[in-house]
Image (spheres, helix red, strand yellow):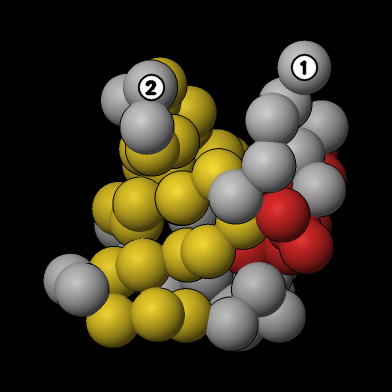
Amino acid sequence: MLCRLTLIPDNTVLIYRGGPDDTYEAALLSFGINPDTTLIFYQKKSLPQDKKIEEEEVSIFLTASRG
């Protein structure tokens, strides 16, 4: 399973390769991003962080500084 995560506002693209039951929470943690500081969107619809990854591309809005 492959998912493209585009981080907003800097438009950094991360490619997540994981298992069939992986969640967005697992994907974000694998990149060192705290899921509690993000909003996940697919086609303008908000997704929960514990949702199984089924979309090929999502936007991740960072609500806190990563630095």
Find disc 1 in the rendering and name its residue. Answer: 67
Q: Residue at x 55, y 44 (%)?
A: 62
Q: Position of residue 42 (x, y in %)?
A: 29, 69
- Residue 51: x percent and y percent? 60, 82
Q: Which residue is mark 2?
A: 10
The answer to whether one can see residue 3 in this image is: no
Q: Residues within 10 Å of mark 1 (few under 14, many from 20)?
A: few
Left or right of 47? Residue 64 is right
Figure quadrant of residue 17 = top right
State the residue lying farthest toward the left: 43
In the image: residue 15, left or right of residue 38 = left
Q: Is residue 45 left or right of residue 20?
A: left
Front-lying residue, 44 or 19? 44
Disc 2 and disc 1 in contact, CB within 8 angstroms: no
Distance Cα–Cα, label 2 vs label 1 = 13 Å
Label 2: few (<14), some or many (≥20) within 10 Å? Answer: few
**Amino acid, disc 2:** Asp
Q: Is residue 42 left or right of residue 38?
A: left
Front one among 1 and 33? 33
